Image (tube, rainbow, N blue to C red):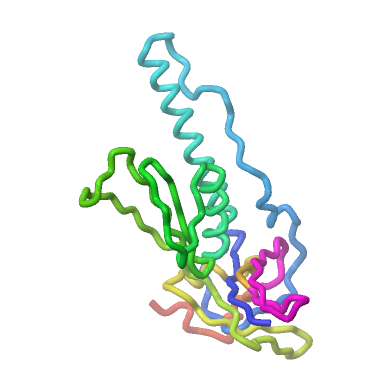
């Protein structure tokens, strides 16, 4: 079984130093820390309550719209533990919004006013909408962003055991603030490739919603460099 995974931090922590191993025996933590199924809810009470003037109604409408946008963004981020989950969640939302999924290798039959998207490698997604009055040669607008982010990736065959602890070897991905990952509950998420019952290989998304790993801070007598600037 092959895996492309990241470790997902869940709590804030104090600055520490760089480690190289992960220890899955961490102190008990409340299970709700890993519960990302709950959608964020916002109060229906307006933040501004003045007169019934047009200005007041406009402000209240703007606030409500802002709350909805922020809430939707937070829901999306809570589901997007990895680039694979980010693309899968974006795909779900686009289908709910009426976009049509295209196969990148097929011949496309695009129509004015249509909304379409396609994915690649389960980690990239391209969505586009065609204007009702669009003509060949007209300009278009592009908005782009990346779905990946700094993380710790599991190395192939990385598990080992020492002094009663199961350790996992990892490699850094991206320019992360790695000391913020120390002394906090971590878990595993990503994409795995498994063999199906018919012998073919199948891609599956994995998201473990409970503490599995921890990177401990070294004791001061093992690393005096922590006071160096």
Decide whether residue 207 is among the magenta residues: yes
Decide whether residue 154 is among the magenta residues: no
Q: Is residue 69 left or right of residue 161?
A: left
Q: Position of residue 132 (x, y in %)?
A: 33, 38
Residue found 65% across the figure and 88% down from its top = 157
Residue found 52% across the figure and 77% down from its top = 17
Tell me the quadrant of the picture where the C terminus can be found.
Answer: bottom left
Tell me the quadrant of the picture where the N terminus can be found.
Answer: bottom right
Considering depth in this image, is 120 or 56 the residue closer to the camera? Answer: 120
Q: Is residue 157 left or right of residue 197?
A: left
Find the magenta span and give its range. 192-213
Q: Is residue 198 above or below residue 49?
A: below
Q: Is residue 147 above or below residue 63?
A: below
Considering depth in this image, is 194 or 150 the residue closer to the camera? Answer: 194
Q: Quadrant of residue 58?
A: top left
Q: Position of residue 150 (x, y in %)?
A: 47, 69
Q: In the image as oriented, which residue stretches furthest toward the top? A: 52
Considering depth in this image, is 199 or 59 the residue closer to the camera? Answer: 199
Residue found 44% across the figure and 13% down from its top = 50
Q: Quadrant of residue 163?
A: bottom right
Q: Is residue 61 above or below residue 187?
A: above
Q: Position of residue 42 (x, y in %)?
A: 58, 33
- Count of numbered marks: 0
Q: Is residue 151 left or right of residue 215?
A: left
Residue found 59% across the figure and 54% down from its top = 79
Q: Position of residue 190 (x, y in %)?
A: 61, 69
């Amino acid at each position: 079984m092959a895996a492309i995974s990241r470790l997902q931090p869940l709590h804030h922590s104090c600055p520490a130093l760089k480690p190289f191993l992960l220890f899955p025996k961490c102190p008990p933590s409340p299970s709700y820390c890993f519960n990302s199924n709950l959608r964020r809810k916002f109060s229906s009470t307006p933040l501004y309550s003045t007169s019934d003037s047009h200005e007041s109604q406009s402000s209240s409408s703007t606030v409500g719209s802002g709350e909805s946008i922020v809430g939707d963004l937070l829901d999306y981020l809570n589901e997007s533990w990895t680039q694979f989950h980010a693309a899968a969640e974006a795909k779900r939302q686009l289908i709910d919004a009426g976009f049509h999924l295209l196969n990148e290798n097929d011949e496309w039959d695009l129509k004015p006013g249509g909304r379409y998207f396609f994915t690649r490698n389960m980690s990239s997604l391209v969505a586009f909408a065609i204007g009702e009055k669009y003509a060949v040669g007209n300009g278009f607008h592009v908005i782009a962003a990346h779905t990946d982010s700094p993380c710790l990736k599991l190395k192939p065959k990385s598990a080992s055991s020492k002094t009663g602890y199961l350790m996992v070897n990892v490699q850094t991905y991206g320019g992360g603030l790695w000391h913020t990952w120390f002394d906090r509950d971590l878990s595993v998420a990503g994409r795995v490739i498994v063999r199906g019952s018919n012998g073919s290989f199948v891609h599956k998304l994995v998201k473990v919603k409970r503490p599995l790993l921890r990177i401990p801070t070294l004791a001061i007598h093992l690393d005096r460099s922590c006071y160096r600037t």
